[in-house]
Every structure is written in C-alpha cells, then in structure tokens.
Amino acid sequence: MAGTARQTMFVYEVYGYGLTSRAWLNVKMKLLVTGCAGFIGSHVSEALLKRGDSVVGVDDLNDYYDVKKKEKNLKILQKSPEFAFYKEDIRNYQGLKKIFEKEKPEKVVHIAARAGVRSSIEQPLLYEEVNVKGTLNLLDLAKDYKIKSFVFASSSSVYGNQKKIPFSESDNVDNPISPYAATKKAAELICYTYHHLYNMKITCLRFFTVYGPRGRPDMAPYLFIDWIVKGQPIKRFGDGTTKRDYTYITDIVKGVVSAVDKELDFEIINLGNNQPIMLNDFIKVIEKSTGKKAVIKEIPMQPGDVDITYADISKAQKLLGYKTETSIEEGMKKFFEWYKKNI
C-alpha cells in the first residue's frame, strides 16, 4: 500500500459504524470472515464491505437458532459485489483449504463458534470440536497461506466467577466454569502457540455481552424484549442482582476493525462497555424502551452462569483507540426500534 494513500486517509461516518472510508483510496483488502451470517460476524462483514474491503464469508448456517435469521443477515451482505459466500463448517479442514486456495485472503477475522454457556454443558464434545478444532484448522491454514494477521473472537466467559473487578487481560483465567469458556481459553492458548512458533500476528478479543440489531435470539436483550412485547413472563435467573457489561454492536465492530488494521504482534484485549448493569435495572431499561411493564418469573441460577462481567478497557483504549459511545439506554432503544421493524 502506497505511503501517499495512507497519508491522505480520512475518517467519516460509514453507515453508522464510524469507520475509516477506503472509497477514495487504493487500499482495499481481502478478508476471510468466519461466522459471517451470525450476529457479530454479519455486522463486521457489513462494516468492512461498506468501507471498501472485499469479504470472503464462511458460515455453516447451523440450526443453533433459526436459520432464517442467518439467511436474512446473509442477504444484506450479498448486495455487495465484493462479498463471496461459502457454506462451510470450520471443522472441515479440506473444505476450508479449498477456500484459502481459491480466494487467497490477506487477513482472517475468526468469529465463528458454537455459542452459549448453558448449551455447552449439554453438548461439550460439539463445543470442543467447533471452538477448538475449528480454530486450529484456521490457524494452520493461515500459517500455510501466509496470512498477514489473524483476529480471534474470544469471550469474557474465560474470566469465570472471579471476584476481582474490573476484569483485566492480565488476570488469571485458569478456572472457567463452563465448557464454552474452557474452549475459548483453549483457543486463545493455541493462538499464542501459533504466534510463538510461526511469528503470526494474532489478536484475541474478549467480547463482553454484545447486543443490538440482529442480536442473537437466545440472549437476554432479545428474549426480554420479545417476552415483554408478547405479554409473557420474563424468566429471570436468580434474584436480579447479577451484573453484565452489555456492549453495543457498533462499539464492538469498531474494536474488531481496529484490531484488523493494527496488525498487532500478539495481544489479548477486552472489548466491553466498562459499565456493568444489574439485571433488575436492565429489565427497567427494557420496560422504558418498550413502554410496557414486565411480569417476572424467578428461576434458580443456572450452572455455568457468572455473577458479574466487567471489562477493564484501558488496554483496548491504548492499543486500538477503542472507546464506547452507546449507553445501555440508547442501545436498547435502538435495538427495540429494529425489533419492531423486523420481527
């Protein structure tokens, strides 16, 4: 990429993501994005396309939740001539190799995963296959095809039920309390191994409870809105005093894209909101957004659930220029507006 092009780069709002535009510059990249039809993956892919990059999207369109929702996300991306889609399972090494060979991506953004803490307790072997073997497949191919950098989507769940807050990247994470969390920790370790052995540039991003338009229907922000609108009781796990660091999708996207562009040597970085909210207060925010009162059905805390998530984002601020711009009130209002138009 020419130095002159870099010097003339400027920033302005691109379809709500606030990312650097490449429209006037000859700096287009080709990126392979796994999990491109999912919630976070579709937003990251859309942002990259909107700023002028090419995206090779990989997704197996599994039925963890309604496939039609993923297909709808995919249609948004397929409007761009710079998007190529491959329906492929990341456990299939040979299938992935054909994609790398044909498309020759410059960078990888690995977001695909089997998600969900509670489901991982029921299907631990599946979670190991997808989240660990799938990541290993991609790292090995990235090594063979000389990928410039690899961004891996990890999770705040790796912190387990630790009492020290906020959670910092230097904290010990040797005590995950769900198979999902354990697979994410294992994948981070494999990422470091490939960095050490092959000098690969890898950034592991620990996401903290991401929500927003196109959000996963199995997560609280979506479920609670859906239940309140339909007049059904909200299933509240525990007494409502647990806290989550809910992070709006556009803030997450900007962090991911910054990690793509920075090409850091090897780093583990939190991407959160740094403002955890108590579950009872979160329900009040949704009541205000929807204009409806919630009926609450209390259910015992579930195995694998943690008491609090709370991100220290100082490292993200320093290395990625990361900052959060969307409060929980504003974010849930935007989410509800999307819900009304799309559900």
Image (spheres, rainbow, N blue to C red):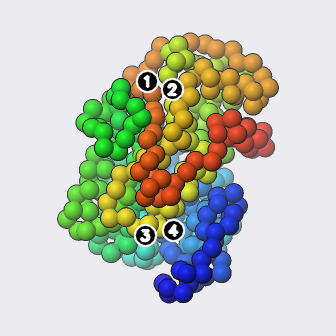
Q: Residue at the left extreme?
A: 197
The amino acid marked with disc number 4 is Val
The amino acid marked with disc number 3 is Lys
Say which residue appears at 43% left-offset and 41% top-offset: 312
For residue 235, side relative to residue 292 (left or right) = left
Residue 201 in sight from this viewpoint: yes
Q: Say if mark 4 contacts mark 2, CB within 8 Å.
A: no
Q: Tell me the element at label 3.
A: strand
Q: Mark 2, mark 3: which one is toward the viewer?
A: 2
The amino acid marked with disc number 2 is Lys
Q: Residues within 10 Å of mark 1 (few under 14, many from 20)?
A: some
- Kindly identify which residue carries mark 4: 56
- Kindly identify which residue carries mark 3: 107
Q: Mark 3, mark 4: which one is toward the viewer?
A: 3
The amino acid marked with disc number 1 is Asp
Of callouts 1 and 4, which one flags the residue occurring earlier in the amino acid sequence? 4
For residue 218, side relative to residue 12 (left or right) = left
Please say if 65 is above or below 277: below
- Kindly identify which residue carries mark 1: 307
Of callouts 1 and 3, which one flags the residue occurring earlier in the amino acid sequence? 3
Q: Say if mark 1 contacts mark 2, CB within 8 Å.
A: yes
Measuring from the top left, give residue 26's x and y in whole percent. Answer: 57, 84
